[in-house]
Image: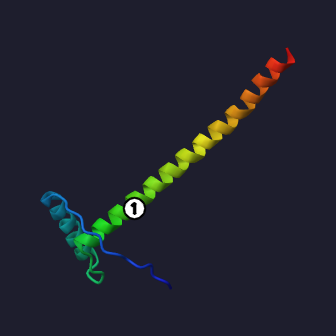
Amino acid sequence: MHQEEKVSLTISIKKEYRDRLRTMAARQNLHDPDQLTSASTIAREIICEQIDEIDRIEADFVAADNAAKSLQEPEQDESSESATDK
């Protein structure tokens, strides 16, 4: 199985968020001690999931916009034909 290459990214967040990420990681480690989880792992998962969700929302928006435009085009063709028929 091919594993995608991960690259480093440095971000600054409030101490409160860091502490919450550490707490989440600690809970995960208590739940599954065989799978070591860190605050940075939790943060990476959250960031990647949110970026993927944004991509899905944008794709849905583009698809809906294109569908709306395609529905409007025949109406414009009909109105221009009516004007030329008169």
Image location (x, y in percent) of residue 44: 32, 68
What is the total number of numbered labels drawn onto the structure image? 1
Q: Position of residue 65 (x, y in %)?
A: 58, 41
Q: Crowdedness of circle 1 by 10 Å Cα count: few (<14), some, many (20+)?
A: few
Q: Is residue 37 left or right of residue 85?
A: left
Q: Is residue 17 left or right of residue 47?
A: left
Residue 43 horizontal/vertical position (percent) = 28, 66
Image colouring: rainbow
Which image quadrant for residue 41?
bottom left
The structure residue drawn at horizontal position 49% and vertical position 84%, both measured from the top left corner, is 2
Foreground of the two, 2 or 78? 78
- Dividing the picture into quarters, in which one does residue 9 lie? bottom left
Q: Compared with residue 8, is residue 72 higher up or lower down, i.e. above or below?
A: above
Hey, which residue is sitting farthest right in the picture?
85
Q: Residue furthest top?
A: 86
| 69 shown above or below 28 | above
Reply above or below: 43 against 65.
below
Residue 12 at x, y = what percent? 20, 62
Q: The residue tagged with tag 1: helix, strand or loop?
A: helix
Q: Which residue is mark 1?
A: 49
Q: Residue at x 71, y 34 (%)?
A: 73
Residue sticking out furthest to the front? 84
Q: Quadrant of residue 46?
A: bottom left
Q: Using the image as rendered, state which of residue 80 and residue 4 is in the foreground.
A: 80
Eyeballing the image, is 12 above or below 77?
below
Residue at point 21% right, 65% down? 21
Residue plotted at (86% across, 18% down): 85
Q: Nearer the viewer, residue 22 or 56?
A: 56
Image quadrant in which the C terminus is located:
top right
Nearer to us in this view, 52 or 7: 7
Q: Amino acid at mark 1?
A: Glu
